[in-house]
Every structure is written in C-alpha cells, then in structure tokens.
Image: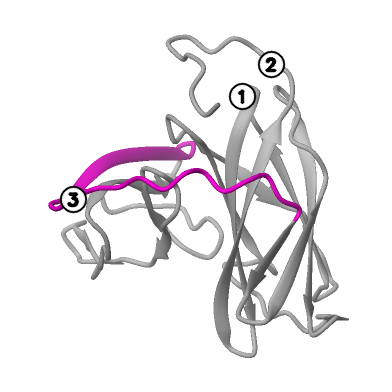
C-alpha cells in the first residue's frame, strides 16, 4: 500500500511501548516507493513490546494495526505508576484536568509550565500544540484521541478521548518547546464499568 491520507501531519504514526507501559516511543518512519516503511528503533530493556501503526488509507477510515516485539533477556515488568494529575519532564511540569468516562468523549486539558511559569510559546507538533496517545493497561488497547484546535500556544492543550471501559490507562503527551519534543506521561483511571467489550476481562486492575 502506498496511498495514505495525512493525519496529524504524517501519513503514518508508529508507536512502540513496553508491555508494562513504562517505555514509550513515537517514531517517524520513512516510506520507500514500494510502500515499505523503515525506521531505526532501540529497545533498551529485555521484555515484550507492542508496536502500533496508526494510519488512514486514501479514501478509507483510520486503522491501527499492532504487532508484538520480543527482546531477549531477563524480564522484570515494572508496576504501573500510580494515578497522578501532574508529570515532570526536563524541568517542565504538565498538569492534567478532566476525567475519563467510559463510553463517551472525555475532555482532557493539559497545562504546561516551566519553573512555575505557564508556557505560552509552545511550538506546533504534528499539526497541533501537542499529540496525545492513550493506551489501556493490561491489553494495551490503543485509543484515538483528537486535539481541539487552538490559536493559543499554551499553556493549555485540550484533547477528547473516548475510553471503552473502566480501569487504568496510560496517557503520553508529546509537546514541543524551544525546538525539542518532550513526552509527559500519566496514569489515569476511568471510573465505572462502561459498555461491555466482547472478549475482554478485568485487565489493568
């Protein structure tokens, strides 16, 4: 396949996470004329990883395909980080407002500050002032998240995420400032059972 729609400034988004959701990478592969995508990938620790290709064929709807990657060695899964409303990365603090509610679009607002001051000169990244990936703990269900268009370059970035069930989720926010992309991560809990999902059980608790 060689014909893709551009979504969030890219024809294909490639996400690689460890099974315990401690490691997250958002990579940007290049496509050759024959349709083969390639990218250099470094997996630092032994264990199981999940790779997601997120794309939309020209004239079609968006798809997410997943594949497992295994790295040999002694694997010690890390526990899921506790639920939190703030994340620290490279001297930046990102705070999260909003709650995940199963079965409906939930508004999430992330605010970026540095040294206690709001950041108001965020740089666009992938067609918005931030890019958010949400994954369900346990089975690593990949959720589509839509940014709200904003003319203000921070400190607030707003997204809408629809979670299919109650339980724990990991949120990874990529944002760009001073020419560098950084990733802030959160553990969030959706309350309530939500609509029943066929073939799923109580993962993530």
- SS for callout 3: loop
Helix, strand or loop status at disc 2: loop
Which of the two discs, 2 and 3, labels the residue nearer the N terminus? 3
Mark 2, residue position = 194
Q: Are marks 2 and 1 in contact (CB under 8 Å)?
A: yes
Q: Is residue 155 above or below residue 86?
A: below
Read off the magenta span: 60-85
Question: At which x and y percent is residue 192?
Answer: 73, 18
* Residue 126 location (% of width, % of height): 57, 67
Q: Is residue 173 above or below residue 92?
A: above
Residue 2's image quarter?
A: bottom left
Q: Is residue 205 magenta?
A: no
Dot 3 crowding, Cα within 10 Å, few <14, some 14–19, many 20+: few
Residue 65 location, x and y as percent? 34, 38
- Disc nearer the start of the sequence (3/1): 3
Residue to which mark 1 is pinned: 164
Q: Residue furthest bottom?
A: 178
Local SS, label 1: loop
Q: On the rendered structure, is 148 left or right of 142?
A: right
Question: On residue 74, which mark appears?
Answer: 3
> Label 1: how many residues lie within 10 Å, few (<14), some (14-19) or many (20+)?
many
């Amino acid at each position: 396949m060689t014909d893709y729609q551009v979504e969030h400034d890219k024809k294909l988004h490639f996400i690689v996470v460890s099974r315990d959701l401690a490691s997250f990478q958002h990579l940007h592969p290049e496509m050759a004329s024959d349709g083969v995508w390639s990218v250099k990938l470094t997996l630092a620790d032994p264990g199981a990883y999940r790779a997601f290709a997120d794309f939309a064929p020209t004239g079609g709807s968006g798809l997410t395909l997943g594949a497992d990657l295994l790295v040999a060695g002694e694997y010690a899964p890390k526990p899921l980080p506790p639920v939190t409303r703030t994340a620290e990365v490279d001297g930046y603090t990102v705070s999260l407002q909003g709650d995940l509610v199963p079965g409906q679009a939930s508004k999430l607002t992330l605010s970026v500050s540095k040294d206690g001051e709001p950041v108001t000169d965020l740089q666009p990244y992938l067609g918005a002032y931030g890019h958010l990936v949400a994954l369900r703990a346990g089975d690593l269900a990949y959720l589509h998240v839509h940014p709200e268009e904003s003319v203000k370059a921070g400190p607030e970035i707003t997204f809408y995420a629809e979670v299919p069930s109650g339980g724990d989720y990991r949120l990874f926010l990529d944002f760009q400032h001073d020419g560098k992309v950084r990733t802030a991560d959160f553990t969030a809990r959706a309350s309530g059972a939500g609509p029943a999902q066929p073939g799923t059980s109580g993962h993530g608790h």
